[in-house]
Amino acid sequence: MNCPICNQILHPAEYEGVTIDICDGCGGEFLDADELGHIVRARDMKFTDEVRVALEERVPAFGVPMEQRRSGLNCPKCGEPMRTMNYSGDSGVYVDRCNGCGGFWLDAEELEQVQILQEHWEDEAPLVIRAMAGELEQARLRAAEQTSRVYAGSRFAFVNALINRLLDAA
């Protein structure tokens, strides 16, 4: 396979327990459809605190800005067009995904950025949920109270209508 960016030959390399294809020219990496999921779950790579902090402090960026969109980038594996996407919808890391085989093209250092962000989200999620537990419980109680009021009102209306119908029939 050749690199879709600089046309150099991609070389297989072991990374986090899977074989990915790497370009020695531009540093880009091609991953088959299932390999990216395996890599972000593995957590074998260790990253410096400096790199982690820089990525973790990113502000969410939704969509794909025009300057990040590529046209004419074809998959090195099957030759189908690739589409630029914002990893996880708001990460600000723009990867290219093949419309045909589902493989991913990541420019130099994007794989590491994806890993760091994914690990950060997984580590922070329980803390955020615990911090919101009180608010979630209050919302649940308010919803239950409103539902019981609506139900009580509808029960009263039903009984009232039933009594009126019995009185009309008599």
Image (cartoon, grey):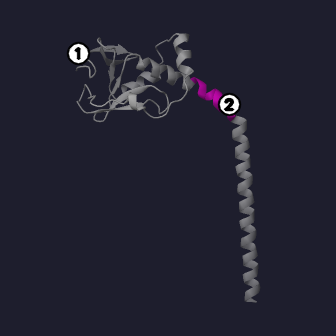
Find residue 80 and report its image quarter. Answer: top left
Quadrant into which the C terminus falls: bottom right
Label 1 environment density (alpha carbons within 10 Å; few <14, some 14–19, many ≥20): some
Find residue 107 and report its image quarter. Answer: top left
Q: Is residue 107 magenta?
A: no
- C-beta proximity under 8 Å, tags 1 and 2: no
Q: CA distance from mark 1 to mark 2?
A: 49 Å
The three-letter amino acid code for the residue at tag 1 is: Ile
Q: Pick the residue in front: 70 or 146.
A: 70
Q: Residue at x 27, y 33 (%)?
A: 81
Q: Which residue in the structure is indicated by mark 1? A: 9
Quadrant into which the N terminus falls: top left
Q: Main secondary structure of the magenta part?
A: helix
How far across and down, in percent of the image, does residue 110 sit? Answer: 41, 20
Which mark is nearer the camera, 1 or 2? 1
Find residue 85 and report its image quarter. Answer: top left
Which type of secondary structure does the marked residue at label 1 adopt? Answer: loop
Q: Which mark is residue 126?
A: none
How far across and down, in percent of the image, does residue 168 sit? Answer: 74, 87
Q: Earlier in the sequence, mark 1 or mark 2?
A: 1
How far across and down, in percent of the image, does residue 147 sit? Answer: 70, 56
Q: Which residue in the structure is indicated by mark 2? A: 130
Q: Pick the residue in front: 113 or 146.
A: 113
The residue range painted magenta reads 123-132
* Above or below: residue 139 compared with residue 32: below
Which type of secondary structure does the marked residue at label 2 adopt? Answer: helix
Count up the numbered dots. Answer: 2
Q: Residue at x 50, y 31 (%)?
A: 90
